[in-house]
Amino acid sequence: MQEVALTALRQYLDGATRAKLIDEALQDALGRYATTLRRLGE
């Protein structure tokens, strides 16, 4: 049972870390290309 809990916790943390990295990359891209994205939306 303890192994199941550890596996679930590892999977959760991996997902949270991955989501955080994706969010940071997206924020960087949005900041970097804000003008271009705004012009494309016009």
Image (cartoon, rainbow, N blue to C red):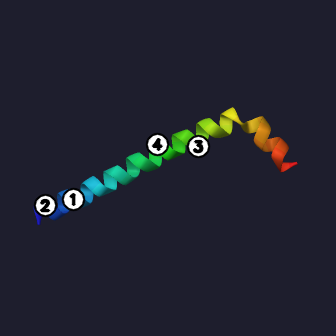
Q: Residue furthest right?
A: 42
State the separation of the CA atoms marked 2 and 4: 27 Å
Nearest to N terminus: mark 1 or mark 4: 1
Mark 3 lies on a secondary structure that is helix
Name the residue: 60% across, 40% down. Answer: 27
- Type of amino acid under label 3: Leu
State the separation of the CA atoms marked 3 and 1: 28 Å
For mark 4, what is the residue?
A: 21
Mark 2 lies on a secondary structure that is helix
State the separation of the CA atoms marked 3 and 4: 9 Å
* Crowd around label 2: few <14 · some 14–19 · many ≥20 (10 Å): few
For mark 2, what is the residue?
A: 3
- Type of amino acid under label 2: Glu
Name the residue: 46% across, 50% down. Answer: 19
Q: Residue furthest top?
A: 32
Q: Is residue 36 above or below residue 12?
A: above
Nearest to N terminus: mark 2 or mark 4: 2
Q: Are marks 1 and 4 in contact (CB under 8 Å)?
A: no
Q: Are marks 2 and 1 in contact (CB under 8 Å)?
A: yes
Residue 39: x %, y % from top left: 84, 42
14 relative position to 21: left or right: left
Residue 26's label in the rendered image is 3
For mark 1, what is the residue?
A: 7
- Type of amino acid under label 1: Thr
Mark 4 lies on a secondary structure that is helix
26 relative position to 41: left or right: left
Q: Are marks 3 and 4 in contact (CB under 8 Å)?
A: no
Nearest to N terminus: mark 3 or mark 4: 4
Q: Is residue 11 above or below residue 37?
A: below
- Type of amino acid under label 4: Leu
Nearest to N terminus: mark 3 or mark 2: 2
